[in-house]
Amino acid sequence: MGVRWDSALFLVLVLVVSFAEMSNGGRTSTFVRNDDLSLDMPLDSDVFKVPPGYNAPQQVHITQGDYEANSVIVSWVTPDEPGPRTLLYWAENSELKNRADGVVVKYKYFNYTSGYIHHCTIKDLEFDTKYYYDVGTGKATRQFWFITPPKSGPDVPYTFGLIGDLGQTHDSNRTLTHYELNPIKGQTLLFVGDLSYADDYPFHDNVRWDTWGRFIERNAAYQPWIWTAGNHELDFAPQFGEPIPFKPYLHRYHVPYTASGSTSPLWYSIKRASAYIIVMSSYSAFGKYTPQYKWLEQELPKVNRTETPWLIVLMHCPMYNSYAHHYMEGETMRVMYEAWFVEYKVDVVFAGHVHAYERSERVSNIAYNVVNGLCTPIGDQSAPIYITIGDGGNLEGLVTEMTEPQPSYSAFREASFGHGLLDIKNRTRAYFSWHRNQDGYAVEADTVLLINRYWSSLEESKATT
């Protein structure tokens, strides 16, 4: 009788597991959005306004300037002639003004010649301090400010915003406005690629790089935007004499790549508060023994999770995606790097590219070796959550066609524009929320509580010993 009961129980368990593996995934939102293309804002819109004054600095933006987060790169453009290569900066409540030196670059692209692009690194800043800075000269001087993050530590709370595939449409403006007015204030923006969409215009009209820079200045001049390159940054166009990829992007957006031992600004890492952020390039060589591969191979083991417990990866092309558009485009990179993400317990991978929102379960597909047939992603608590947030609002519109039935790895998906917030509480808990840009500022359309992969596994191992 005992043998028959054990056999019956085993059969029930097999049926339950089999059903779980075959069942559909999570939830597809019932929110139905108008899928008409979002139109570009007119060039005479206030969001593109050129600041007053001769040769006044414009397109001001900042990003982290070093590995440890106590430096800031300030970038701006002067249209008529090179401005001063320096800027002035000072801490709040301090009368001592300091000077930081920089460089000026410019480039030509087809029939376009850029303005004078300034990049200036402010070094050795105090943590958790508000600074003001002046760019320009004379009556055209403009003043901005930023706040440095707290020094890295395991329980330092910090909030990151997430935006991808932004462009410069009316929906782009709604998304950025929603982010700015969200009651939960993002302190640094993680941008997962596809910035201006200049390449969608005839001859990759680089004037659209200038308009986009003026559009985002209202936010990017005051808080760091951490840059990831997407396919719309390639600007590879040998058909009209432009064979160098990423030319406009690399001239305009400098990042601290050498600080993390990278040989390219297209992949790099930074520490910020309690997070360790790794930026990868989906559109650079990433196969075995390539520079990006060798860099990441050395990068992951050096992450100190007792200092920066939250390990975040940014890339443009998602590894897991259940929309029809760009379906399985990230498969090659997944095959190359998913096992590393599981081994090192990456907490979350953010990507763009797909013009919609999706959040995955914690799954992996690392068992598959072509011949064993184990090609269905399975639940894996050491795996990251994959979040696609390429829904900034660009002129190419939303992706509404989805693969059916919803696959088991997909927890939630919706074809809408919006932004995300990653609110890190301490070493073990973080809260992610996604906000569609048609709702009130405080509305959360999707949420998930993230349990830190490193610390949860450490606690589990202690509990079993």
Image: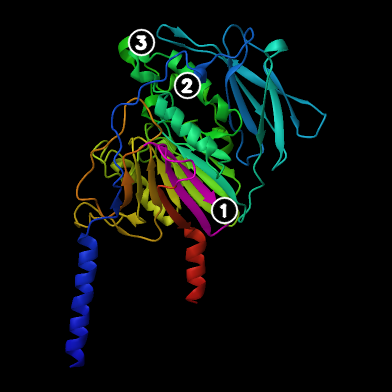
Residue 196 visible? The answer is yes
Residue at x-position 22% and y-position 85%: 6
Q: Nearer the viewer, mark 2 or mark 1?
A: 2
Instruction: Report helix, strand or loop for mark 3.
Output: loop
Q: What amino acid does circle 1 point to?
A: Asn
Q: Earlier in the sequence, mark 2 or mark 1?
A: 2
Distance between the alpha carbons at the discs numbered 3 and 2: 24 Å
Mark 1 sits on what residue?
304
Q: Which residue is mark 3?
A: 241
Q: Please, what is the three-letter code of the amino acid marked with disc 3?
A: Gly
Q: What label sits on residue 283 in the rendered view?
A: none
Q: Picture coordinates of residue 125 (x, y %)?
A: 71, 36
Is 46 placed left or right of 354 in the picture? right
Residue 228 in view (yes/no): no
Residue 286: which quarter of the image?
top left
State if disc 1 and disc 3 touch (CB < 8 Å). Answer: no
Query: Which label number is shown at residue 212?
Result: 2
Q: Is residue 71 left or right of residue 234?
A: right
Secondary structure at badge 1 equals: loop
Count of marks, rendered view: 3
- For the residues carrying marks 3 and 2, which lies nearer the camera in this image? 2
